Amino acid sequence: MPWELKSDRPIYSQLIEQIELRICSGVYPLGSKLPSVRDLAQEAAVNPNTMQRALAKLEEDGLLYTNRTSGRFVTEDVNMIKQVKNRLAKEHVQVFLKKMTELGFDYEEILSIITTIAEEMKE
Amino acid sequence: MPWELKSDRPIYSQLIEQIELRICSGVYPLGSKLPSVRDLAQEAAVNPNTMQRALAKLEEDGLLYTNRTSGRFVTEDVNMIKQVKNRLAKEHVQVFLKKMTELGFDYEEILSIITTIAEEMKE
DNA sequence: ATTATTGTATTAAGTGCTTAATACAATAAT
DNA sequence: ATTATTGTATTAAGCACTTAATACAATAAT
């Protein structure tokens, strides 16, 4: 899973989202140790300060915790991760429905379009 | 339709999106005259330079055109607007499906969730 | 003819994000 | 005991975006 960073939004917030995603999808498993700030920064081709900023936020949210000098770890609270996953899913759906509704599509049309495009994407 | 501007992304690109949306959804009808740059800027609580930047981009894309000092107008090309609308819809669906898939949901689950949340949102 | 409105351009200042280059303290590894 | 690695903090610089304050030319409105 490569790091996808665009220049149209602050990098640190994109990092937050992608690390959240990695935690929710199991790329960084429950309780596992993360690479060091410097290693993560290098992986993502980003300044260590920027990576640190993202990690600090995730720690503040309780998704990560630090053991002073032994490194940083993913929370062992399964429930918290499930909640984050559900929150993200709900947000994605709401944003999507809002945008499509604003564009003038009704519910039936939305389901129809999503089905069509999903078929296209399978190929 | 109020202007929704957040601080986590360049304002000018949010303006582009929202004006595009207003054109696609008929808030600014085919061939109609837009408010002046200064008026639009005031409506959106934004600097005229920033609004100008957004309008210039939309003009470059062909969605708007300028009559030197009589003002700025929406294109009369129905087809172009339809194309934009379809492009936006497709992009929204693709982004949505990508995010949900990354989170670990399969197609059935996505349809199920979207149906549930759509029901909730009707209330 | 005069005035107001149109789009457009310029300059200077402020802000937030990012990077680079360090440095420090704590502790794991040797 | 020494060394390397950990997270963390600081300072300075550069960049893009935004705002404020103007100004100008063209033309619509009066």
Image (cartoon, coloured by chain):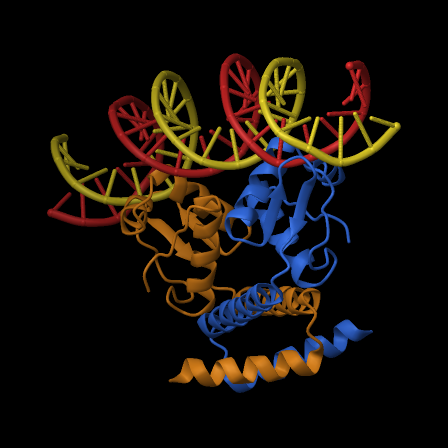
Chain colours: A blue, B orange, C yellow, D red
Q: Is residue A80 above or below residue A46?
A: below
Task: Indicate the quadrant containing the C terminus of chain B: top left, top right, bottom left or bottom right.
Answer: bottom left
Describe residue D12's horizontal placement relative to residue D21 as left or right: right
Query: Residue A82 appears at what percent x and percent y?
Result: 60, 68
Describe residue D22's horizontal placement relative to residue B120 as left or right: left
Q: Residue at x 64, y 59 (%)?
A: A76
Question: In this rendering, does residue A83 appear at all?
Answer: yes
Quarter where residue A111 is shown? bottom right
Query: Residue B107 appears at what percent x and percent y?
Result: 70, 79
Q: Decide which of D11, C17 is in the foreground and name it.
A: D11
Q: Decide which of A122, B35 is in the foreground and name it.
A: A122
Quarter where residue B112 is shown? bottom right
Q: Decide which of B53, A55 is in the foreground and name it.
A: A55
Total number of numbered discs in the rendering: 0
Query: Residue A65 appears at what percent x and percent y?
Result: 60, 47
Q: Is residue B58 above or below residue A101?
A: above
Describe residue A53's horizontal placement relative to residue B70 as left or right: right
Task: Indicate the quadrant containing the N terminus of chain B: top left, top right, bottom left or bottom right.
Answer: bottom left
Q: Is residue B62 above or below residue B92?
A: above
Q: Residue at x 72, y 36 (%)?
A: A45
Query: Residue A112 appears at what percent x and percent y?
Result: 62, 84
Question: In this rendering, does residue A8 appear at all?
Answer: no
